[in-house]
Amino acid sequence: MPNTFLSEISINPTNAAILARWQALALPHAWLVAGCLFQTVWNLRSGKAPDADIKDYDIFYFDPDDLSERGEQQAQARADALYKDLGVHVEVANQARVHLWYPGHFGRPCPALVSAEDGIRRFLVLETCVAVRPHEVHAPNGLDGMYQGRLTPNPLTPFPELFARKVVSYQSRWPWLSVSRT
């Protein structure tokens, strides 16, 4: 199934362009993550354009040697320059520094993450914990649930009110999605 997933997410021309320029981005331990991936699959399953209603394209990387906001801003500037012609917002985040800003932004604690993959496995919805880079898929909870349209709260991020908001947002765009509590 990982090959099918890579093929399907590449039908979205923005995903394909981001991955085609991946080497030029030159970020350590980087992954294209989450919404632009699973939403592409859900769009295809719904008969929509592959890039319909995708708000942004997120890239996680991990650089424990530079926890500065300036370092992350420089990484963002590289991505902005590399992808400016795509006409979408590509957001870059160093997962090594999430614990520094997360409490102020979300009002909840976040442990220091040990890898970009650690950040990926903490998305609010288990089935959305997905990431790719050229020829590689990271899906710690597998891909079956995402393809089946299940939405399950992630025990690593036990924030029911935030999960409920995600569900409302997702089901407004893909009404066939179903909530699972297990």
Image (cartoon, helix red, strand yellow):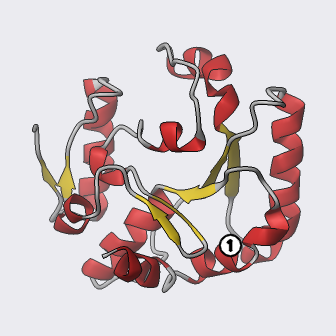
Horizontally, residue 153 falls left or right of residue 53, namely left
Query: Looking at the image, which is closer to me, 22 or 89?
Result: 22
Query: For the C terminus, which image quadrant?
Result: top left
Examine the image and state in which quarter residue 63 appears. Answer: top right
Residue 57 in view, yes or no: no
Residue 161 in the image: state x and y as whole percent: 28, 26
Query: Looking at the image, which is closer to me, 173 or 123?
Result: 123
Q: Secondary structure at mark 1?
A: helix
Residue hosting label 1: 18
Amino acid type of the residue tagged 1 in the rendering: Ile
Residue 13 in view, yes or no: yes
What residue sits 47% from the left and 14% below the top?
A: 108
Residue 147 sits above or below residue 100 on the image: below
What residue sits 87% from the left and 36% below the top?
A: 71
For the image, the number of numbered tags is 1
Query: Looking at the image, which is closer to me, 122 or 12?
Result: 122
Horizontally, residue 67 falls left or right of residue 10, namely right
Residue 171 in the image: state x and y as whole percent: 23, 55
Residue neighbourhood size for the residue with mark 1, other residues' Cα within 10 Å, grouped as few (<14), some (14–19), many (≥20): many
Query: Looking at the image, which is closer to me, 45 or 93?
Result: 93
